[in-house]
Amino acid sequence: DTGVSQNPRHKITKRGQNVTFRCDPISEHNRLYWYRQTLGQGPEFLTYFQNEAQLEKSRLLSDRFSAERPKGSFSTLEIQRTEQGDSAMYLCASKAGTSGPANTGELFFGEGSRLTVL
Amino acid sequence: DAKTTQPTSMDCAEGRAANLPCNHSTISGNEYVYWYRQIHSQGPQYIIHGLKNNETNEMASLIITEDRKSSTLILPHATLRDTAVYYCIVGGGATNKLIFGTGTLLAVQP
């Protein structure tokens, strides 16, 4: 499968614990995005990378959240001291960063990592 | 990024065309209109996008009004597998950061 891969698919944790999600984008996609989705809502933008550089962070990304993309390939999203309000689906998407006619505007999403904080 | 307005839900009979409207009256000149859909428990899936002209691909057609303040996604022959939440998004630009709303839940009825 050459799509966007996210692990783990499901994570149940107790409040106060740290969790880390991993995203493997489509090979050679230099842009990577993280979104969060709660029940009944559309995905909310959290942050995005171009290669290893984190270029934008949403106000939703509190200081308990940190995202990295150390080598410009896979990315991790860590949540420290989890709270019940962090329960959500965390979605990763990637995109080729070309401009012009080859830039289809298409984001390729993974299946998401569902977090439940007890 | 411009905001979009979509109906909360719609029904469509299997085999008929599904026409999903979207209003984006504050769209700016360089913003695209994107449509994605999300089937239950899956990540969003790209359908189509356009700037000014109508677009068609193997999944759907996108009709954008001349003033670009609204658009319609057309699924020509809806099937049960098209039951999903459909998101109309305006924006993109240099970052391609897409801001999702709550979308339209399309229920295709047998």
Image (cartoon, grey):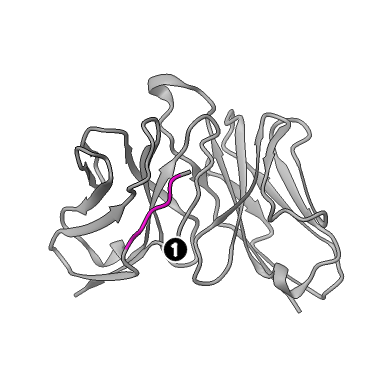
Image quadrant of residue B86? bottom left
Q: Is residue B35 above or below residue A52?
A: below
Query: In the picture, which quadrant includes the C terminus of chain A?
Result: bottom right
Find residue A51 and report its horizontal and vertical position in percent. Answer: 68, 29
* Residue in the foreground of this view, choosing between B46 and B52: B52
Find residue A87 and report its horizontal and vertical position in percent. Answer: 68, 70
Task: Give the prevailing secondary structure in the magenta stretch.
Answer: loop
Q: Residue at x 29, y 61 (%)?
A: B82
Chain under callout 1: B
Residue B89 on the magenta span: no
Q: Is residue A82 above or below residue A47?
A: below
Stretch in magenta: B2-6
Find residue A77 and report its horizontal and vertical position in percent. Answer: 74, 51
Dot 1 surroundings within 10 Å: few (below 14), some, or many (20 or more)? some
Residue picked out by circle 1 = B102
B71 with respect to A60 (left or right)? left
Q: Residue at x 55, y 51 (%)?
A: A110
Q: Is residue B52 above or below residue A62?
A: above
In the current view of this chain or complex, which residue is farthest to the top?
A100
Find residue A97 and report its horizontal and vertical position in percent. Answer: 54, 27
In the current view of this chain or complex, which residue is farthest to the left?
B16
In the current view of this chain or complex, which residue is farthest to the bottom?
A118
The kind of residue on which mark 1 rests is Thr
